[in-house]
Amino acid sequence: MCEVEEDTLTALENSDSCYKCPSASNGVDRCISPYSLVLLARQYLANNYTSEFATTAATSIPCDNLRTLWTPSAQSEFTSMLQKCANWALVVSSNNQSAEQKDFGNLDECPFSQFMPTVVDDLFPASYPPTVRYTSSFYATKKSGSILERMYEDAESKKYDGSDGNPLSGVYDTTESDFYDFYSDSIVGRDMSLAVGSAGVTVVAMIIHTKSPFLTLMGLFQIILSFPLAYFVYYFIAGLV
């Protein structure tokens, strides 16, 4: 996962799609490391998990060193910390009360100063042995329309490392689902071209069969009128969106 993030950060840097800050190792501007399990693991290994993320040198632990330092005892303690934070997040989100109003009882406080529950999945707190099946990594990317479109194209062309299921499998999108919108727009355009081609074939077949341009145009007009009715039934009556 660490190597996947590094590959994706390199792709974001090449397209200038990310916000940057000087690297802790050489002072060269690099994309800000994503908020992810890898960042939390780096902070844990650096014993710096109570600090603000902006003040940490988390990127100073390369992936190879991270793999070496990730001993069974370190993994066990880090997993225990994640469980505490996940249980803490469940209590905080249980109702509309603020964190100060909650009754946490004997629940251990989350040791990380800033914890986002999205680094684990909803089954993690109750899983045995503790297993993270799904996780989210948040990259500090720019949000202008042209950059979002370029990022979508890069994701479609596999420039962002998805690991391809060996052993991980990843997908990319923005917090506002912009990639999904771009994909939907491209599918609509392709479907419309197929619809226009189908209408052309239908017109030719009807002219050959009826030998009447008038009947052909009326038949095509009836087909066109069916779309608003179908949309009304689909959207307003069936409630499908």
Image (cartoon, rainbow, N blue to C red):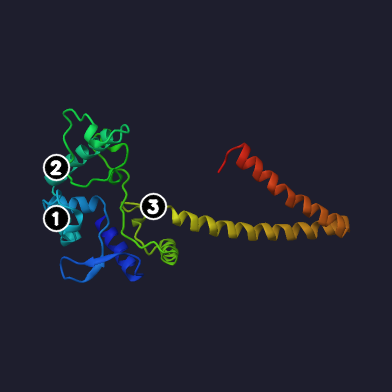
- Residue beneath label 1, please? 68
Instruction: Check disc 2: other Cα within 10 Å, few if <14, some if 14-19, many if 20+.
Output: few
Task: Locate the C terminus and report the quarter of the image it occupies.
Answer: top right
User: Could you tell whether 195 is left or right of 33 in the image?
Assistant: right
Q: Element type at marker 1?
A: helix
Compare residues 132 and 117 and report the one nearer the observer: 117
Q: Is residue 127 visible?
A: no
Mark 2 → mark 3, Cα distance in angstroms:
31 Å
Residue under the image location 24 percent in, 57 percent down: 2
Res 208 visible: yes
**Earlier-in-chain disc, 1 versus 2:** 1
Front disc: 2 or 3: 3
* Disc 2: which residue: 77
Specify the quadrant of the image occupied by residue 6.
bottom left
Check whether the beta carbons of the residues at disc 2 and disc 3 lie within 8 A of each other: no
Specify the quadrant of the image occupied by residue 140.
Answer: bottom left
Question: Badge 3: how crowded within 10 Å, few (<14), some, or many (20+)?
Answer: few
| Residue 77 pos. (x, y %) | 14, 42
SS state under label 2: helix
In the image, 111 versus 3, the foreground residue is 111
Amino acid on which the number 3 mark rests in the picture: Thr
Mark 1 or mark 3: whose residue is earlier in sequence: 1
Q: Which mark is residue 179?
A: none
